[in-house]
Amino acid sequence: MTDAAHKQAPSGFRFKLNDGNLERLISIASPLMLLLAWEIAARVGWIDVRFFPAPSRIFETLIKLVESGALWRHLSASMQRLFWGFLFGGIPALLLGIVMGLNKTFRAIFDPIVSATYPIPKSAILPLILLIFGLGEASKIVMVAVGIFYPIIINTVAGVREINKIYFDVSRNFGARGWQVFRTVAFPGALPLIMTGIKLGVGMGLILISLAEMVGAKSGLGYMMWNAWEILSVETMYVGLLVIAALGVLFTIILNEVERIIVPWKTVR
Amino acid sequence: MTAQALRDNPADTADVKIRLRGLSKVFETRKGPFVAIDNLTLDIPTGCFFMIVGPSGCGKTTLLRILAGLEKHSSGSVEITKPADNRPGNSMVFQGDSLFPWMTVWENASYGLRMRRRPQGEIKDVVGHYLMRTGLSKFVDSYPHQLSGGMRQRVSIARAFANDPDILLMDEPFSALDEQNKLMLQEELLRIWEETRKTVMFITHSVDEAVTLGDRIMVMTAHPGRAKAMVDVPFPRPRSVLELRAEPAYGEFVYKIWGYLREEVHRARALDEGSVA
């Protein structure tokens, strides 16, 4: 690559920045610059390190937490709750969403319930969930499930309803019945919006799991951060934030890749 | 069984595939009832390539949807002779894009057979055959958005033929295509049709297309849809789309059909303008 560049530009090596490259460079450099500024500001004493410890200190704490195994323990506890919450919230939402999208009667029954409960802030029902499901694993899983349920069901219903009617005509004309229509038209047709729902749902799940673990848990990233506040270990708090942010980015990358594979007709250009 | 024979024996009802008696379809709209089809009586013989020509909004598509079982008629009767074996009654080539965007060419073309749970071997043979006949063998794994409009319509035709229906219903399948593509697809359609000579009901607004493809042409009136004229096409089969156009009789025949249609087109336009104002 650089060889070719040399041959084409005999006057000497010149790295040619096109618009795309420049933008990518800037978007990598800007957070690094911020970190650098933060580090300098912390060391020089421009900011209060009790609230904003230097990035290098946070990184040291991260290493310490990884070595002691504590981070792994909290991370895996959170991930397990997310996983089960995702299944228990996502699958019913998906199935009910498709049925509601296909069937007017089901829509008439469930739509008012979904619409009426959707605007309730999920964080506000945490006390109720703790009351019903106790302080064990169940309450955290339910919390995640509730958060994931709404974006998926709402997007699935919209996804099915947005499918061009002609595809249902085709499937009927070519002999598809019941489950076949579900499997060959409603589900794949709604899949692009279902994926949008899943992405939103996972984001919601991350928010709610951190919150739920802060109140009634003895493990998990949320607990780790809450505990850090109680013992005034600010660096640990930042490690928690960092890991949750990284999880968010990681899930987005994975889900985008999944989308590219299972929705090839929308993403392959 | 030639077109000539059909014309000579218009009363021959021994082998009627589709029999319509006083068929009407009324849609209830906010402005009151809208008569899409009014008292249509019609016999279509088995193996006939039946063309319906009419101005837009004359209920052509509604008629096809009733025959396809996608719409219920309001009054009158529809009788369709059931196929002897358990093959499907009809398959439709829809107007415009009707391929499932989430399926490959192969999955689209094999859809009917897969839904009827035919054996894998049969699906492979039949779908392979029709994709080859429509020149799509190299594109079996492509998705519809990767194909041109003409190729998509070919898949649509292959899908209908591969389903091996008793009757083919075609709803202006070529109307969105450019002239060259249209000619090529008409030619291909005739070639494939010659293999099986299924009963076809084909809707078009193009007189040229009706004369080129059909055995018999019904000209329909606008608002409400009625049969205005029924004409047998005198040209022998197998036909070549291009050579047919070179015949002097072709032009005369097209002119004759246009005579029936012209009035209706004007009337339809007057009605449209009236409803706008």
Image (spheres, coloured by chain):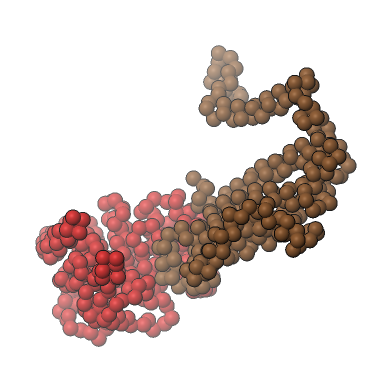
Chain colours: A brown, B red
Percent of width and height locating residue B209: 23, 61
Residue reaching furthest bottom? B14
Image-quadrant location for residue A38: top right
Q: Is residue A129 left or right of residue A185?
A: right
Q: Which residue shows up at 53% across the image and 54% down it?
A: A193
Position above or below: A185 against A119:
below
Q: Is residue A86 left or right of residue B195?
A: right
Q: Is residue A216 in sight in this rendering?
A: yes
Quadrant in the picture for the N terminus of chain B: bottom left
Position above or below: A173 against A203:
below
Q: Which residue shows up at 42% across the image and 51% down it?
A: B147
Q: Which residue shows up at 79% across the image and 44% down it?
A: A226
Q: Which residue shows up at 18% across the image and 55% down it?
A: B277
Position above or below: A242 against B139:
above
Percent of width and height locating residue B148: 39, 50
Residue placed most toward the observer, B177 or A80: A80
Q: Is residue B122 in sight in this rendering?
A: no
Percent of width and height locating residue A237: 78, 39
Residue placed most toward the observer, A26 or B127: A26
The number of discs equals: 0
Percent of width and height locating residue B184: 30, 56
Q: Is residue A97 left or right of residue A129?
A: left
Residue placed most toward the observer, A51 or B155: A51
Residue reaching furthest right? A68
Residue placed most toward the observer, A49 or B81: A49
Image-quadrant location for residue A187: bottom right
